[in-house]
Amino acid sequence: MFEDNFESGLGKWTGSSGGPTSGLIVQDPLATSRGNVLTFTSFSYTGDIFTASEISSVGYVAIHVSFDYLGMYGGSGGFVGVATGNPFVAGGWIAGVDQSAANGAGFTGIGISNDGYWHNYDIDITSMINWNSLNDFYLIAEDWGDSGRSHGAYFDNIKVTGSVPEPSALSLLALGLGGLAILRRRRRS
């Protein structure tokens, strides 16, 4: 559905309303082998960086967002969310340093750590997508905070994946419905 490890720049991303973003590609500040990562040069409150194209949820039975996150300062940090438009129209935050703010309609977001270490997060957003009847959405990210420091939030390996129904499950459903139709027909005669 969507994947970016930031080794090729920000070509898959745009700013609010297609404008500029404070997103910046830098080397991993912990000097691990991960290479380039995303950080921000300023703070935002309604999404700083949006996927350049909408992500379609049509045909998927489960949708997950996964990402690696490094938070460097206690008072500032990153947020990840989904939006129905660019600029942000509706949707909600699915993860953030302030868990109480990382909640969308029909979804309780998770808190992410600002402890100076890389962490991987994998979040099932199916309930949020279904609750809001989202067929298409943008993934958004930002560095939000009150510490006055930029470069406090780093992201890498952002992915949106979806599961489709197994063909065998669909076959069993069709077989069961066919059996019910035959039983109903027999009872009528």
Image (cartoon, rainbow, N blue to C red):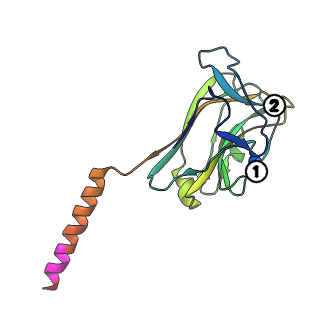
Q: Residue at x 66, y 26 (%)?
A: 37
Q: Nearer the viewer, mark 2 or mark 1?
A: 1
- Specify whether residue 186 is painted magenta: yes
Residue 24 picture location, percent across and down = 74, 29
Q: Is residue 115 above or below residue 11?
A: above
Magenta stretch bounds? 182-187
The circle on residue 41 is 2
Secondary structure beneath label 1: helix
In this view, which residue lies farthest toward the bottom?
189
Amino acid type, callout 1: Ser
Secondary structure beneath label 2: loop
Residue 186, image quadrant: bottom left
Q: Nearer the viewer, residue 14 or 174?
A: 14
Amino acid type, callout 2: Thr
Residue 60 picture location, percent across and down = 45, 52
Dominant secondary structure of the residues highlighted in magenta in the image: helix
The circle on residue 17 is 1
Q: Nearer the viewer, residue 93 or 133?
A: 133
In this view, which residue lies farthest toward the right?
148
Check the picture and name the quadrant holding the C terminus.
bottom left
Residue 148 picture location, percent across and down = 87, 31
Q: Residue at x 81, y 37 (%)?
A: 43
Residue 42, image quadrant: top right
Q: Residue at x 65, y 56 (%)?
A: 84
